[in-house]
Image (tube, rainbow, N blue to C red):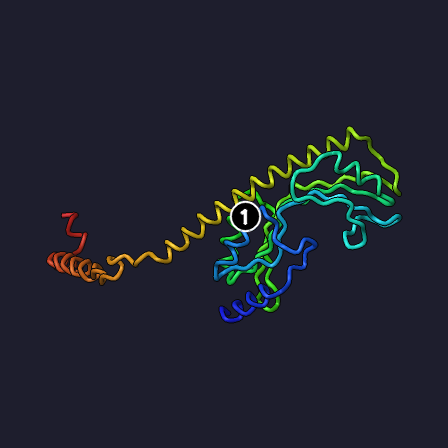
Amino acid sequence: MDKTFSQWKRQCQKKMDQSKKGSVDQDIEHVVSLLNSREEFFTTSSCSGRTILIDGARGSSGVQKQNCTWLFVSHQKCTSEDLMSVLEKSSGDAVLKFEPFVLHVQCRSLEDAQLMHSVAVNSGFRNSGLTVGKAGKIIMAVRSTHGLEVPLSHEGKLLVGHEYVNFLTQTANQKMEENLRRIHRFYQNLQAALITEKLQKLQLPDPSDSQEPQHLPDRLETEKDKKDKTSGDFGGYGDAGLLL
């Protein structure tokens, strides 16, 4: 299994980054680097968190990112002016979204995935979970639920005013700040968990555990035999002799 996992890791790290940006987001470079430096993990996809404004096609049901136009995207905090300037370009149904940090990590074993899941949940990413594929691939997804999704226009017509867009911008920026705090907490907790795991593996067995156990049952049996022998002096009357 370790050999197969190593092959998967090499193959994944040889592939080109398929994201629109083409590289790891700056705010999570240290997280991705730490995981990929470990023999039991490697990352398959990631996003540090982003505020996006997408324009869906007219008459489309719901918002599908692959069938829409990206009007705006930022992995940092933004301003209401940033959003208002691109909203003018909307010809369909514009939707403002904040998408929090997400990270997919392939793990060598279920024990490794459980460690990662514990770290994620304790860091605030309570929507995290793992899946096991038919080929034995164990994928741990680090996710949270503090997202945002608000429609702003319909068929090119703006549905809200500048004041509301300003309010949504502040809300999205607050979520971005909380998102970065959780990422920092996740990184610290991950470091601590990996150090603890390493120390546990390096611990030597307690010498007292290797000593032969004392034969207490034999000693107790001997005492029992003595008691039985003493009881036999009553000539077979047993406890009935006490009635005299």
Q: Secondary structure at mark 1?
A: helix
Residue appearing at x 53%, y 50% in the figure: 30
- Asked whether residue 71 is in view, the answer is yes
Against 82, is 141 above or below?
A: below
Q: Nearer the viewer, residue 210 or 228?
A: 210
Residue appearing at x 75%, y 44% in the figure: 72
Q: Nearer the viewer, residue 23 or 176?
A: 23
Direction left: furthest residue? 233
Amino acid beneath label 1: Ala
Against 135, is 71 above or below?
A: above
Percent of width and height locating residue 179: 60, 41
Count of all numbered marks drawn on residues in the image: 1
Against 205, is 127 above or below?
A: above
Direction top: furthest residue? 163
- Asked whether residue 236 is in view, the answer is no
Q: Quadrant of residue 202?
A: bottom left
Q: Nearer the viewer, residue 81 or 215?
A: 81
